[in-house]
Amino acid sequence: MIKENCYLTDQQIQLFEIFGFLVRRNVFNREEIHKINEEFDHRLRSLKAEADPNNEPLANNNWPNRNPHTPYIASLLEDPRIYVPSEQLVGEDAIPIHSNANSYSISSSWHPDTEDSHLLMVKNVMYLQPTTGDHGALRVIPGSHRNPLHQDLLRMGLDAAFRKHTKQSPKGMEFDMRGEDVASYIFSSQPGDLIMFNQRTWHAAFGGYEDRRTCTFNFYQNPKSPEEKTSMRKLIEAIRSSANKNKKFLNKVGSQYDPWWLENPEKKT
Ligand SMILES: O=C(O)CCC(=O)C(=O)O
């Protein structure tokens, strides 16, 4: 089972390059999803118990997985079903940057994760509950990782609601259409399905509800050219400053990985 669902075909790779995303079904089985949910429950409960009650509740509780509290989820970054396809898309020397858990209480408005055009960044997203268009499914705008579409959407202010919510200043024009009415592919999914997307691809999710869950695994291209290296430095700095911000809300959340993970207790190579 694990081996069967590892390798992407040339056609899948081609579709990823053209559309900026790729859907993979039944990658994890029911028992594995159960194990992930158990660790997720436990970690969310303890992070909430440890958080300062005076902190403002967050619409997206987000925490890193690479720690001894969630050993099974921490191992997924090194599961061939995650890293083999990621390396096929990003390169064999791809760098695993994030392994995160998210518990949302709202929808997510349209946004790309990055506007950077030098480094290829790929995110694997696994929804832990069934999703449909009006029940928290991820939507992606096919081809929006590429210019001119990527830039056109920025210019028309499609991310206005996202920027407002994340307290960033507006960049484009006023955008006042319902996000649901923007043309897109809707990733209706069952737990165990995965979507991989180029992080420049515009995405959103509507029909949010309390404790909507995802696990995400991101791989970045290993920078070689001066432009790629500059991009990587900027991204790492942005990750560092957002980790410090999160610390205020969920006391324990800081670095992307615990020293336990670096010690490699399972002696994985
Ligand atoms: O499910 C969602 O609310 C959106 C997820 C998202 O933006 C992401 O994983 O990058």
Image (cartoon, rainbow, N blue to C red):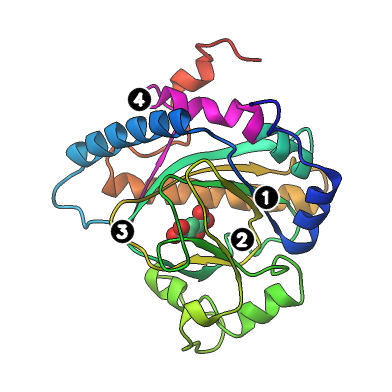
Residues at circles 2 and 3 in contact by the CB criterion of under 8 Å:
no
Residues at circles 2 and 1 in contact by the CB criterion of under 8 Å:
yes
Residue 105 - label: 3
Q: Secondary structure at mark 2?
A: loop
Q: Is residue 168 above or below residue 254?
A: below
Mark found first going from the N terminus, 3 or 4: 4
Q: Which residues are magenta?
A: 60-82
* Of the two numbered discs 1 and 3 in the rendering, the one whose residue sits closer to the viewer: 3
Mark found first going from the N terminus, 2 or 3: 3
Q: Secondary structure at mark 3?
A: loop
* Quadrant location of the C terminus in the rendered image: top right
Please name the residue shown 29% across and 39% down the image. 44
Mark found first going from the N terminus, 1 or 3: 3
Q: Does the segment drawn in magenta span residue 207?
A: no
**How far across and how far down the image is residue 226, in percent?**
80, 50
Residue 69 - label: 4
Quote the CA–CA distance across marks 3 and 4: 23 Å
Asked if the beta carbon under badge 1 is closer than 8 A to the nearest atom of ligand 1, the reply is no
Q: Which residue is outermost to the left?
A: 53
* Of the two numbered discs 2 and 3 in the rendering, the one whose residue sits closer to the viewer: 3
Which amino acid lies under the numbered mark 3 shown in the image of this protein?
Ser
Mark found first going from the N terminus, 4 or 1: 4
